[in-house]
Image (cartoon, grey):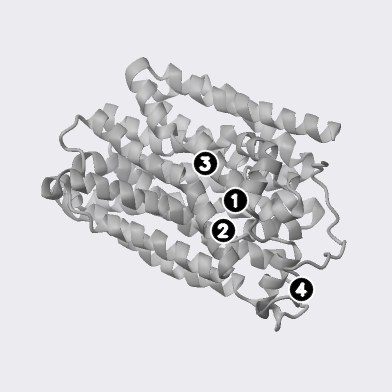
């Protein structure tokens, strides 16, 4: 099987059961041109709303949940418990993908997206209403875990195919540029979430913050989800987008079949951006937990530094698109994996280097994250044959998050607290090595095939 990353953009799509003209959705489809920029807007809106939810929960796992849900444990143990529940969403995400792919097969893309985003919003709002451990005991922790799993299932189901459609419709010489657009949602979502928590911490007394203030960002997340739902439905439900998605055969495939026939590509795709996904939480969630536990710094001021870092990440994500279009996405990811590996050696020195060292760790880390994460999504998705690309891209993303990022805060904090920050360096280095190995294997298989 050939897994070449090049395909003919001008070749007409073959007739298929999903082609235009075969289905009531496409009766009114017209032949108008859909600009990649329009698709990019939908991708950015969708990803920014999801990442805002993501980081609201992540920041709360550090600042709120150890006190509200685990008051019986030490600060370190409470944070580790919170990070354990944090990882549940990444375990549940592939399950959500499988369930909602079946919903799309039986009903429609619009029904799937609506149900998924309502589940995401409902789970997020449910966390805002949760009683504390002091009020409900262990049941509060169980409910938090269930709602976190609901978020993960919903995130798996919210895959709309627009990133794959964007990649397929981008000009040949600008695929790196268009690939990075959806990745902008991560730093945008972080800035909004961190800014909201920083404001709450700055303006509220600690008692007010822990009683009701922390709940407000979850309400905001629910409201943003509703707005994003209508914005995304407005795109994916139009005849023009349905026609493009169907022509590109971006429809669900049988999960058992794709696992059996495309398992190699799933594994390579999940590992290719491992360095980027490992770094993702090591510059966002982990350092925040380290500062809360082992530093006297103002938390709101540290969040402001992270927001500056995220702003620089936006710039470096944009730069990654320009770089990738000049040297290639695989080369870009490989070089950044090497740089992340080098950066990993400085983690202990920087995190133990006082305010200057901590700030430098955040700034450099976010810049490297932007350059690598900008090209991380679907880096080898063209390996999949057309009929598997929709489901393959979704599962690859799920597995990449699970392997690279899902347990990163838990592992990094556990290792650093018990054995020292040097083990965080080894953890990040292993991600860089994994990325280089996967990219090398992908290159070797491409040449051989």
Q: Residue at x 51, y 47 (%)?
A: 94
Is 68 positioned to the left or the right of 119 in the image? left
Is tag 2's residue or tag 1's residue first in the polypeptide sequence?
2
Is tag 4's residue or tag 2's residue first in the polypeptide sequence?
4
Residues at marks 4 and 1 touching, judged by CB atoms closer than 8 Å: no
Is tag 4's residue or tag 1's residue first in the polypeptide sequence?
4
- In 3D space, how far apart are the residues under numbered discs 3 and 2 (Cα atoms)? 19 Å
* Between marks 2 and 1 in the image, the one whose residue lies nearer the viewer: 2
> Residue 394 shows which numbered tag?
1
Q: Residue at x 65, y 78 (%)?
A: 25
Residue annotated with mark 3:
401
Residue annotated with mark 4:
33
| Quadrant of the rendered image containing residue 119 | bottom left
> Residue 40 shows which numbered tag?
none
- Front-lying residue, 28 or 47: 28
The spot of residue 128 in percent (x, y) is 26, 57
- Label 3: state its secondary structure: helix
- Label 1: state its secondary structure: helix
Q: Residue at x 56, y 28 (%)?
A: 431
Quarter in which the N terminus is drawn = top right
* Between marks 3 and 4 in the image, the one whose residue lies nearer the viewer: 3
Mark 3 packing: few (<14 Cα in 10 Å), some, or many (20+)? Answer: many
Is tag 3's residue or tag 4's residue first in the polypeptide sequence?
4
The spot of residue 341 in percent (x, y) is 58, 24
* Between marks 1 and 3 in the image, the one whose residue lies nearer the viewer: 1
Residue 283 visible here: no
């Amino acid at each position: 099987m050939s897994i070449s990353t090049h395909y003919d953009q001008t070749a007409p799509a073959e007739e298929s059961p999903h082609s235009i003209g075969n289905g009531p959705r496409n009766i009114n489809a017209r032949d108008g041109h859909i600009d990649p920029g329009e698709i990019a807007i939908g991708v950015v809106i969708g990803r920014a709303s999801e990442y805002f939810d993501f980081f609201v929960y992540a920041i709360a796992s550090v600042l709120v949940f150890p006190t509200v849900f685990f008051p019986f444990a030490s600060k370190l143990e409470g944070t580790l418990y919170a990070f354990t529940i944090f990882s549940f969403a990444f375990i549940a995400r592939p399950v959500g993908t499988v369930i909602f792919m079946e919903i799309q097969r039986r009903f429609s893309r619009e029904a799937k997206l609506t149900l998924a985003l309502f589940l995401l919003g409902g789970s997020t709002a449910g966390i805002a209403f949760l009683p504390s451990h002091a009020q409900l005991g262990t049941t509060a922790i169980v409910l938090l875990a269930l709602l976190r799993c609901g978020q993960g299932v919903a995130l798996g189901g919210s895959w709309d195919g627009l990133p794959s459609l964007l990649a397929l419709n981008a000009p040949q010489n600008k695929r790196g540029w268009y690939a990075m657009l959806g990745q902008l949602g991560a730093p945008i979502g972080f800035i909004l979430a961190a800014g909201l928590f920083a404001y709450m911490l700055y303006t509220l007394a600690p008692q007010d913050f822990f009683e009701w203030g922390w709940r407000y960002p979850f309400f905001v997340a629910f409201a943003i989800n509703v707005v994003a739902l209508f914005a995304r439905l407005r795109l994916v439900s139009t005849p023009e987008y349905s026609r493009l998605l169907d022509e590109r055969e971006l429809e669900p495939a049988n999960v058992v079949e794709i696992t059996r026939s495309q398992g190699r590509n799933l594994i390579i795709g999940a590992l290719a951006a491992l360095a980027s996904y490992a770094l993702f939480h090591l510059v966002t969630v982990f350092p925040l937990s380290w500062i809360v536990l082992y530093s006297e710094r103002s938390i709101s001021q540290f969040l402001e530094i992270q927001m500056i870092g995220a702003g620089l990440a936006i710039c470096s994500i944009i730069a990654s698109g320009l770089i990738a279009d000049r040297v290639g996405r695989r080369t870009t990811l490989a070089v950044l994996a090497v740089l992340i590996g080098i950066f990993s050696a400085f983690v202990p020195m920087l995190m133990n280097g006082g305010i200057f060292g901590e700030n430098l760790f955040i700034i450099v880390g976010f810049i490297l994250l932007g350059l690598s994460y900008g090209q991380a999504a679907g880096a080898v998705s063209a390996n999949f044959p057309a009929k598997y690309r929709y489901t393959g891209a979704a599962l690859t993303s799920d597995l990449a998050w699970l392997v690279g990022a899902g347990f990163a805060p838990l592992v990094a904090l556990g290792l650093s607290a018990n054995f020292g920050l040097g083990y965080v360096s080894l953890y990040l280095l292993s991600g860089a090595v994994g990325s280089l190995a996967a990219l090398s294997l992908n290159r070797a298989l491409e040449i051989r095939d």
